[in-house]
């Protein structure tokens, strides 16, 4: 079964037969196609058809049980109801969960961006050309070891026994090209670029090739960096990476669970330089992955997280909102324990801040600083519950209008301190695949290079 | 050529499905494929979470799917689907053929599937003999209760996950195997808090194909280990960035070898041109103190398997012998594209991934030294008692977090330090492993790579690295 109405009707009748009066489910159906190449030869071509449904039921003690399945046959759905019902005996008595009060609110009418599949052959042909062009950009670029082009078509649905019933369909395509360059007696260098769009026709392949080539080639001439403390300029990508890595500071679920550096009383605290504004804006027109509602059916919304350096809001699911005596914010993920996560971060320089005298700009600052282009190994080097990080990065030593790539180094610090040590946020914002941000300057952070 | 009877049917995991599988394979070959492989999977999973003194999540899940891979020359196409009907499987293999744009010239012969190699005999009762949700909940609650001993512990978590998987593997070279796999893991996590000081501790334990392993798990010992680690680190100072000798502890200390060197010995890395060891077979790549092994046969180990996901029984592979590179870890595509013989290492997370060459139980073999011998050989260094996660970049540079570290001064362990990361490159570090202890132990983990997340063990005795860059503040 892949039809929402058919699934809903079947679950309604089957639930009745099991005396289950309250239930909800979220499901997704997708068709994905992807290609990889190796010097013009198709390396692996993939297609997949996937379906997954997560079903929650409430028992007569109002405790919730859950089951997830990819078997959407009648037999599978009946089994899912039965298992969820059994699991409800172990539902969390200390934190009751309900339907989102917003699950039937009207959702913002975002345009359903759905392209027509171009097919594997077209994907392959496009990637072959892209790989060839990138290889031809510089003689030092020997291989494109990590490359791929994909298109995905999916439908997401949410429904519950109270009559909520919503769905949306989208398509998305993505290309990534990571080149490896080598020159005699020098260490190999690697860099790349990722671009996404609603379909292949929306992706700027040439800019992906140019960006991957430019980044890779520019790092060929490198130098070691002495261990020490340096003034830092974060690129938009790298600053968004950090914000996302520490997004548990905005996350009510993480706060309740004790794994956030914020606490219930943190709202209103000055946590950053007043120059900093941060929003979560899942419906932003530039967000290719936007979804009109979350896993509990709550409409997605724009939310201010940091306003002029002050912590303004937390993100919520239904149950965390109830504990905090507020409304769900559209950030829930359906699961046995409902998760909460940010959608799409937008960082901006706040208005009405008297900082005109700040002359730090990555395009014309002549003093010595380190430009952090891209942070790596986030899963290993971030301790979100402690607020600390130690991350390898790709970057540059900049001074007097000149720059040289850093051979290898890690950057370490405390995120709360970093927010307060911001010394400038540039005006121009840049679009990235994970959000929007300007360049952000920080007074001083530790860098380990040559010890 | 196998005769096919076109009947409406779908995969039944309680049956061999031989006729249907032969029909699908024949169909693929008749359309011009050189090779066809079908991987069928039926899963029944459960996870349980206990936070503080309450069960907060019980999450069962189940599903089924098929992954169909075809080869033409050295190219391959892979299609995965949840539709296990005859029509769905025929449609999937046709799609795979179309993707590769095959022009039919000659068709490969197919003599049918061999007699099924049934590795699932004696495993059919596993789902009945594993612990119940009540038993799991009680033991996890006992574990988190043990973590309550320290008042500074602010967050206590115990988690359990069971992954039961029934697989059927069939391919056009006649391979026909079925198996049942069972993996169970249990983890403990704490966060300790005192004013501005914070520390965390975690341990994960795991087994394969051992239904009773969780019941025998010594939760008190595990809880004490986690508690001691987090309390030791609560008031630790940040380490200074430096270049020093280090001692890496046994068990999970092996994660560095796994990440920094093991991945570079997978044939997928040769195919990509991203390993510096591609042309180093029978050459010295490490200190002569180092012998390293990857195997899938140790009973109960988290990375062991009766048969790999391409239908081959796993072997014990000596990767490095006394510092000399002896073997690469290879799967079917790896053998086809690089010439290195398969090692029973074709693995995948589930049906939606094509198998790739992946590590299983990977470890540095034990040496002759005691842990004290290693520590006393260092006048100024770092003891890495517990390692966190890490990663290796496309150019081979690795970076690993040290969860629990102690300074070594004049041959003795001194104060705890936090915030350390180990930074280096396999080609530079492997020759610097100069001493191996005699206390080899393995630890379970999950490895994420090209074919998804698979169960592995990492391991080593205590080892000494003569010099490495330590990232700090």
Image (cartoon, coloured by chain):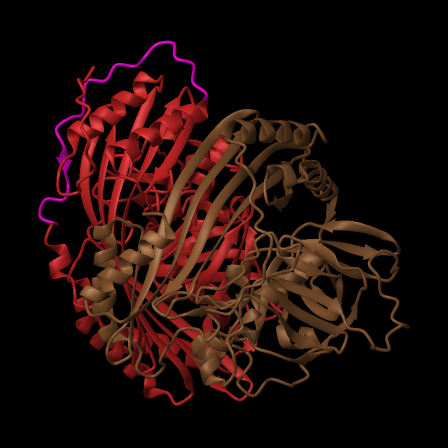
**Chain A's colour?**
brown
The boundaries of the magenta stretch are B101-123
- Residue B437's place in the image compared with B137, above or below, is above
x, y (%) of residue B90? 30, 29
Q: Is residue A314 left or right of residue A229?
A: left
**Chain B's colour?**
red
- Residue A205 or residue B226, whichever sits in front: A205
Q: Quadrant of residue B227?
A: bottom left
Q: Is residue A257 left or right of residue B92?
A: right
Please tell me whether residue B112 belongs to the stretch shown in magenta.
Answer: yes
- Residue A355 or residue A397, whichever sits in front: A355
Residue at x-position 17% and y-position 22%: B5
Observer able to see residue B326 = no
Q: Main secondary structure of the magenta part?
A: loop
Q: Quadrant of residue A63?
A: bottom left
- Residue B398 or residue B110, whichever sits in front: B110
Label tally? 0
Residue at x-position 28% and y-position 37%: B39
x, y (%) of residue B321? 36, 40
x, y (%) of residue B12? 17, 40
x, y (%) of residue B219? 25, 74
Q: Quadrant of residue A279?
A: bottom right
Report the quarter where the C terminus of chain A lies.
Answer: bottom right
Observer able to see residue A358 = yes
Q: Is residue B232 left or right of residue A307?
A: left
């Amino acid at each position: 079964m892949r039809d929402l109405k058919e699934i809903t009707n079947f679950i309604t009748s089957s639930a009745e037969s099991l005396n289950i009066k309250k239930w909800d489910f979220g499901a997704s159906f997708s068709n994905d196609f992807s290609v990889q190449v190796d010097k013009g030869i198709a390396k692996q071509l993939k297609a997949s058809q996937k379906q997954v449904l997560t079903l929650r039921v409430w028992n007569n003690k109002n405790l919730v049980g859950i089951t997830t399945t990819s078997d959407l046959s009648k037999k599978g759905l009946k089994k899912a109801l039965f298992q969820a019902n059994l699991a409800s005996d172990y539902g969390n008595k200390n934190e009751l969960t309900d339907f989102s009060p917003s699950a039937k609110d009207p959702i913002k009418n975002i345009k359903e961006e759905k392209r027509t599949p171009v097919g594997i052959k077209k994907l392959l042909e496009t990637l072959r050309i892209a790989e060839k062009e990138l290889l031809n950009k510089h003689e030092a670029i020997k291989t494109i070891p990590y490359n791929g082009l994909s298109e995905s078509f999916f439908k997401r649905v949410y429904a519950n026994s109270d009559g909520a019933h919503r769905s949306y369909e989208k398509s998305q395509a993505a290309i990534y090209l990571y080149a490896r360059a080598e020159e005699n007696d020098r260490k190999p260098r690697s860099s790349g670029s990722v671009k996404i769009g609603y379909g292949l026709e929306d992706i700027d392949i040439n800019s992906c090739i140019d960006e991957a080539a430019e980044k890779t080639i520019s790092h060929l001439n490198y130098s070691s960096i002495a261990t020490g403390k340096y003034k830092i300029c974060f690129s938009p990508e790298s600053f968004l990476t950090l914000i996302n890595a520490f997004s548990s500071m905005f996350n009510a679920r993480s706060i309740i669970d004790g794994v956030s550096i914020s606490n219930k009383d943190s709202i209103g605290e000055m946590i950053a330089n007043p120059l900093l504004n941060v929003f979560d804006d899942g419906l932003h027109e530039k967000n290719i992955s936007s979804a009109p509602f979350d896993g509990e059916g709550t409409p997605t919304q724009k939310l201010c997280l940091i306003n002029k350096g002050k912590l303004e809001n937390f993100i919520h699911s239904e149950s965390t909102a109830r504990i905090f005596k507020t409304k769900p914010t559209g950030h829930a993920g359906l699961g046995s324990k409902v998760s909460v996560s940010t959608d799409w971060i937008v960082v901006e320089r706040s208005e009405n801040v008297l900082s005109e005298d700040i002359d730090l700009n990555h395009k014309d600052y002549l003093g010595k600083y380190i430009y952090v282009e891209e942070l790596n190994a986030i899963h290993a080097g971030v301790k979100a519950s402690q607020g600390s990080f130690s991350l390898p990065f790709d970057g540059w030593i900049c001074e007097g209008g000149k720059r040289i790539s850093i051979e290898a180094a890690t950057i370490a610090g405390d995120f709360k301190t970093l927010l307060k040590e911001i010394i400038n946020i540039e005006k121009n914002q840049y679009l990235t695949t994970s959000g929007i941000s300007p360049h952000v300057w920080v007074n001083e952070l530790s860098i380990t290079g040559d010890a | 050529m196998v005769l096919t009877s076109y009947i409406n049917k779908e995969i039944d995991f309680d049956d061999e499905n031989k006729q249907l599988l032969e029909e699908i394979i024949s169909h693929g070959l008749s359309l011009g494929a050189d090779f066809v492989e079908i991987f069928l999977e039926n899963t029944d999973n459960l996870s349980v979470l206990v936070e503080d003194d309450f069960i907060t999540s019980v999450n069962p899940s189940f599903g089924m799917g098929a992954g169909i891979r075809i080869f033409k020359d050295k190219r391959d196409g892979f299609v995965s689907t949840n539709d296990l009907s005859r029509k769905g499987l025929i449609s999937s293999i046709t799609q795979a053929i179309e993707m590769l744009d095959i022009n039919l010239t000659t068709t490969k012969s197919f003599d049918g599937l061999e007699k099924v190699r049934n590795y699932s005999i004696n495993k059919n009762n596993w789902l009945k003999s594993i612990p119940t949700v009540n038993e799991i909940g009680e033991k996890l609650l006992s574990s988190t209760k043990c973590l309550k001993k320290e008042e500074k512990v602010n967050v206590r978590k115990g988690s359990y996950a069971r992954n039961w998987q029934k697989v059927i593997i069939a391919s056009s070279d006649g391979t026909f195997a079925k198996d049942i796999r069972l993996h169970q893991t249990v983890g403990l996590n704490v966060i300790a808090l005192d004013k501005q000081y914070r520390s965390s501790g975690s341990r994960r334990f795991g087994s394969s194909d051992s239904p009773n392993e969780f019941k025998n798990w010594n939760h008190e010992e595990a809880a004490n280990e986690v508690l001691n680690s987090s309390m030791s680190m609560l008031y630790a100072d940040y380490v200074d960035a430096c270049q020093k000798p280090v001692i890496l502890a046994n068990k999970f200390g092996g994660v560095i070898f796994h990440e920094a060197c093991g991945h570079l010995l997978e044939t997928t890395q040769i195919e990509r041109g991203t390993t510096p060891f591609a042309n180093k077979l029978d050459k010295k790549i490490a200190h002569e103190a180092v012998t390293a092994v990857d195997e899938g046969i140790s009973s109960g180990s988290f990375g062991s398997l009766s048969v790999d996901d391409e239908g081959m029984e796993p072997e014990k592979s000596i990767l490095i012998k006394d510092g000399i590179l002896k073997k690469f870890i290879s799967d079917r595509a790896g053998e086809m594209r690089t010439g290195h013989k398969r090692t029973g290492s074709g693995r995948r997370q589930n049906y939606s991934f094509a198998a790739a060459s992946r590590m299983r139980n990977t470890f540095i073999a034990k040496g002759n030294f005691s842990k004290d011998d290693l520590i006393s050989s260092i006048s100024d260094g770092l003891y890495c008692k517990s390692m966190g996660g890490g990663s290796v970049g496309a150019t081979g540079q690795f970076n690993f977090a040290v969860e629990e570290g102690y300074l070594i001064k004049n041959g003795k362990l001194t104060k705890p330090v936090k915030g350390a990361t180990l930074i280096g490159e396999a080609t530079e570090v492997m020759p610097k492993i100069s001493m191996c202890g005699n206390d080899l132990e393995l630890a379970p983990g999950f490895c994420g790579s090209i074919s998804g997340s698979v169960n592995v063990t990492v391991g080593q005795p205590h080892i000494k690295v003569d010099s490495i860059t330590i990232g700090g503040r």
